[in-house]
Amino acid sequence: EAQVTQNPRYLITVTGKKLTVTCSQNMNHEYMSWYRQDPGLGLRQIYYSMNVEVTDKGDVPEGYKVSRKEKRNFPLILESPSPNQTSLYFCASSPNRLASTDTQYFGPGTRLTVL
Amino acid sequence: GENVEQHPSTLSVQEGDSAVIKCTYSDSASNYFPWYKQELGKGPQLIIDIRSNVGEKKDQRIAVTLNKTAKHFSLHITETQPEDSAVYFCAATTGFQKLVFGTGTRLLVSP
């Protein structure tokens, strides 16, 4: 089944404890992206990647890191999480590097709480 | 950069009624306008999109209209059903890598 998977789905952690949220797609998509969803703010892009070893900042990259060593994986790293990073996170992928004008396929989301 | 405003934030309708969600965008160069539906506990899913060379697009009970002069576009759902209950997001882009989303509309369809 073609899909985007994220792990974990739920995570409660404490301030400063490094964490990684994994994202994997099995559709051989070139484009991958991370969003955070907050009430009243919609979906905001954190980072995106147009291909292996190519990443770039979105609208809200502060406090986050990403890597794209393989085409299928795009982990989101929080080196020192803070409470303002409590949010619902979505990974997405798209077949075309010009993903802005192509369908994006979203994962099921990761709900992160930072205490 | 692009800014997308979406209204209303919540919308309650009776089953069988129509629902309309409106979005405005700021960048006149934007040329692609998708709509995503997010069901509870799931990620957003594309339901319909429109490009700037088209004024209206329909797919069964859903339709999207685009007014480039006024820089706004709308989602129309006719004969609403309980399974239409979800959060709907509009988005806009000029064609570069970033897609800018609206703040979402929570649609509740009551039986």
Image (tube, coloured by chain):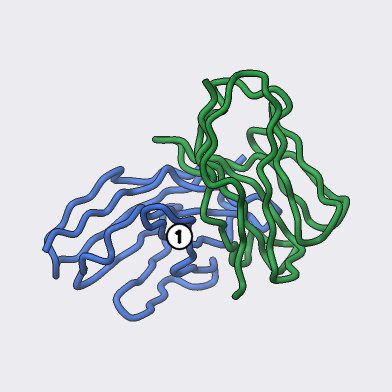
Q: Callout 1: helix, strand or loop?
A: strand
Rendered colour, chain B: blue
Examine the image and state in which quarter residue A63 appears. top right
User: Residue A57 vs residue B54: left or right?
Assistant: right
| Position above or below: A54 against A99 | above
Residue A22, x across and y down, in percent = 68, 48
Image coords of residue A45 (percent x, y): 62, 43
Q: Is residue A98 left or right of residue B36?
A: right
Is A59 placed above or below B32 here? above
Q: How many marks?
A: 1
Residue found at x 70% / y 22%: A80
* Chain identifier for the green-coloured part of the image: A
Q: Nearer the viewer, residue B33 or B67?
A: B33
Q: Nearer the viewer, residue B72 or B16?
A: B16
Report x, y in % for residue B42. Answer: 45, 56
Asked whether, in this view, residue A61 is left or right of residue B43, the answer is: right
Q: Indicate the quadrant containing the N terminus of chain B: top left, top right, bottom left or bottom right.
A: top right
* Residue occupying image coordinates x 18% and y 52%: B12
Kind of residue indicated by mark 1: Tyr
Q: Picture coordinates of residue A60 (x, y %)?
A: 64, 33
Residue annotated with mark 1: B36
At label 1, counting other C-alpha atoms closer than 10 Å, the crowd grade (few under 14, some 14-19, many 20 or more) is many
Which residue is at 54% across, 71% downward? B53
Q: Quadrant of the C terminus of chain B?
A: bottom left
Q: In the image as oriented, which residue stretches furthest toward the bottom?
A: B60
Chain containing mark 1: B
Is A82 situated above or below B12? above
Q: Nearer the viewer, residue A4 or B32?
A: A4
Left or right side of A9 for B85 = left
Q: Residue at 27% x, 59% y: name it.
A: B85
